[in-house]
Image: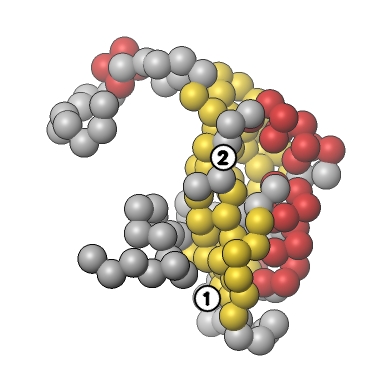
């Protein structure tokens, strides 16, 4: 397989649309701790690749698409695993992030919180708190062997 330094193949790479990519880069960096990997194109129609730990996202201009802030609703949520979710939460809150789910521990063993970004995208930041088998919290496992 060919290796491409621009796009990591071992991760899903979501594309998220913003009214202003430069504003989104600044906000995601300042409020949520992302780092910019690269930008391309002009400030109106270009994009950027951002990362936090091992999670990568592409930012693009809304163009002919609707951003959640324009449509009035969101259709997805992105989960990013961080090593210290309590510190991440404190930092996001200190920067004035719109917290939409308070820091909590879920029945499936994650410590997490939710935030809405400047264009209405929903983000969950999570850290493994304890190991819980899916069957313990009510999931029906369809296939074994994908991951331990």
Question: What residue did someone put label 1 on?
Answer: 65
Q: In terms of secondary structure, where does tag 1 sit?
A: loop
Q: Is residue 142 visible?
A: no
Check the image and report above or below for 65 versus 116.
below
Residue 144: percent from left, percent from top: 16, 29
Q: Nearer the viewer, residue 67 or 21?
A: 21
Q: Earlier in the sequence, mark 1 or mark 2?
A: 1
Q: Name the residue located 76 percent from the left edge and 44 percent from the top edge.
A: 97
Q: Picture quarter containing residue 146?
A: top left
Closest to the camera, between mark 1 and mark 2, is: 2
Q: Is residue 122 above or below residue 103?
A: below
Task: Identify the residue at image location x=30%, y=21%.
Answer: 134
The picture places residue 54, in percent across and down from the top left corner, at 50, 47
Q: Is residue 91 left or right of residue 129?
A: right
Number of on-image labels: 2
Residues under numbered marks 1 and 2 in contact, where contact means CB atoms less than 8 Å apart: no
Residue position for label 2: 124
Residue at 23 percent of width and 66 percent of height: 1
Could you tell me if residue 112 is visible in this image? yes
């Amino acid at each position: 397989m060919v290796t491409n330094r621009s796009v990591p193949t071992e991760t899903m790479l979501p594309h998220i649309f913003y009214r202003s990519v430069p504003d989104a880069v600044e906000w995601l960096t300042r409020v949520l701790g992302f780092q910019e990997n690269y930008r391309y194109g002009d400030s109106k129609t270009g994009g950027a690749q951002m990362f936090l730990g091992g999670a990568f996202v592409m930012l693009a201009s809304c163009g002919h698409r609707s951003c959640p802030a324009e449509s009035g609703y969101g259709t997805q949520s992105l989960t990013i695993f961080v090593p210290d979710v309590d510190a991440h939460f404190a930092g996001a809150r200190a920067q004035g992030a719109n917290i939409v789910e308070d820091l909590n521990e879920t029945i499936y063993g994650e410590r997490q919180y939710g935030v809405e970004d400047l264009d209405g995208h929903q983000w969950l930041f999570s850290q493994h708190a304890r190991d819980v088998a899916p069957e313990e919290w009510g999931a029906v496992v369809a296939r074994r062997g994908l991951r331990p």
